[in-house]
Amino acid sequence: MNDPATVTAAATHDGRGQFGALFRRELRAYFLSPISYLVWVVFLVAAGWLFVIPLRNNAPATLSGAFQSMSTLLIFVVPLLTMRLLAEEQRLGTLETLLTDPVRERTIVLGKYCASLVFFVLLLLPTVSFPLILAALGEPDPGPVAGGYLGLLLLGALFLAIGLLCSALTMNTIGAAALSFTLLLMLWGLGAAAESLAPGIWRDVLDYASAFRRFEPLRRGVVDTRTLVWCGSLIAWTLAVGTSALSLRRRR
Amino acid sequence: MIEAHGLVKDYGARRAVDGVSFAAKRGEILGLLGPNGAGKSTVMRMLTGYLEPTAGSARLAGHPLATESLQARAKLGYLPENAGLYAELRVGEYLDYRATLKQVAANEKARAIQRALLACGLTESRERILGQLSKGFRQRVALAACLLNDPQVLILDEPSVGLDPLQVAEMRKLIRELGRDRTILFSTHVLSEAESVCDRVVILDRGKLLAEGTPADLAARFVARALHVELLGDADRALAAVATLREATAELLSREPTVRLRVTLPAPPVAESRAALARALAKADAVVIGLESEKTSLEEVFARVTQEAAA
């Protein structure tokens, strides 16, 4: 028998071990899923193509256009990466054991979110070759390149949080993908709508709410702490809502 | 160890569980019986903290689930009816993962896994991939995962569903062994299983608790209205003596070497009716040498209880 004191002491632990276990299993699931590889290949081919087009037209040596295109690609990529995070647990019948083990809902959400974030970083990793190619052909300004990657990472992190929330809300993989795609499309639509408006309060409001518009300064190499705080707060809020959605399943 | 107080669960306008209360103490195996849709799984899910009750409360190993759910769950082993497993993991990897989630201390984990593998007959299967296991083995792995934290309370929802007869027998043996120093609540459709494994049973139907007690108590209370009487004397006079008792009927089973009667009484044979029967037979100069209640199966109890509730 386990020493009850050992188990009790462990039970009062802050859940770092549980986070690690959830994180590792989720990351492993990404690497074992054919959809992950399909998404990876499609994203890299599309991003590579969108990087090459301006170069063939003798455009200036910047990655601004590629970053913008990759941001738009995330609308399609992220729902496919996040749809199974919690919905798959429901489909497999493992959610019941997960929620009856002594694990906090926030640990489950954070473990899964961080795994998706790491996979997303790995997805972006091969695109580092783009600035290297650009450096071989010309003299790109490193500021906008670093800012562009920071913006892409933040945008991806925000989208992943939204995708995870959708997975928690629907508990159905296809439903989660459809809902997160719709929400991300709406976010993109806010930016497009802002552009079409004349300067004024409504344009300011849409600009404020649009994730895509907010990251434009980063692509120019301008790091605004307000953008970082806005994004960080929105991610934290979305994950908190996702945690609540998981908790509310107990009351359904 | 397990206390349920007036548990209620509503799904919209439909009441799935209606004021269910019962308790089980340490070292007791309590069976939860009921037809499909009786609310057994819902009751179990409320007791594991997976579902919050609409009303009522529950305590597990001394912890109220409403306020100390994590502490209660740390002392629980739960096997859901359709326990899912991650097909890509090996048995040992899965148990390691679940042991971490169950907060088994790092220096205890290897021993806990070994003990669970041994208890469920899985020591040879540690390296096998979960997705390639048979239903029986998968059920064993799920049960092994329940045991990792050496739980004080085990809640098993239909643990023998899908198992072959040999595996069912093994599962029953394992439940009996585990029940020696734990509290076990388990649901089953197989009443003979409940009869052979449980110390007590609770019968649910349409969300309501209909009866609770040992299988023998329930049989005596709800069904067993017949007594088998063995006596020395004249069979016809004995039959006439029984006929003098109100609403009692007797059937002659044998005349030689002793007279054996099957006597049916209007109410379960409590001490007074047994005494009245013995007195009536004594008046007919019959010497009663044996008098025992007719054996009643849990199936009959279950049928009677649910029929009475429906009526």
Image (spheres, coloured by chain):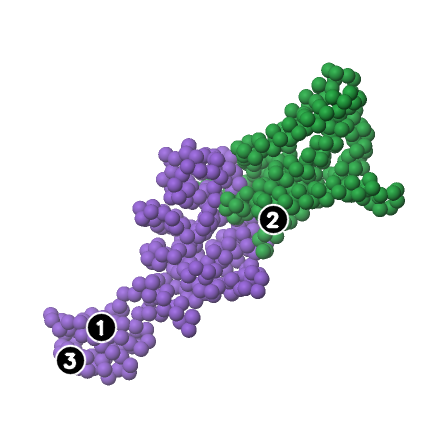
Chain colours: A green, B purple
Residue B13 falls in image quadrant = bottom right
Disc 1/disc 2 C-alpha distance (Å): 62 Å
Compared to B8, does A238 lie above or below? above
Q: Which quadrant would the C terminus of chain B be assigned to in this image?
A: bottom left
- One can see residue A251 in this view: yes
Q: Amino acid at mark 3?
A: Asp
Answer yes or no: do the residues labelled 2 and 3 have beta carbons within 8 Å?
Answer: no
Q: Position of residue A39 (x, y in %)?
A: 61, 33
Q: Amino acid at mark 1?
A: Arg
Say the numbered circle drawn on residue A170: 2
In this picture, residue B285 sits left or right of residue A163? left
Residue occupying image coordinates x 49% and y 34%: B107
Tag 3 residue? B236
Disc 2/disc 3 C-alpha distance (Å): 75 Å
At label 2, counting other C-alpha atoms closer than 10 Å, the crowd grade (few under 14, some 14-19, many 20 or more) is: some
Labels 1 and 2 share a subunit: no
Q: Chain of mark 3?
A: B
Q: Chain of mark 1?
A: B
Q: Residue furthest toward the bottom?
A: B244
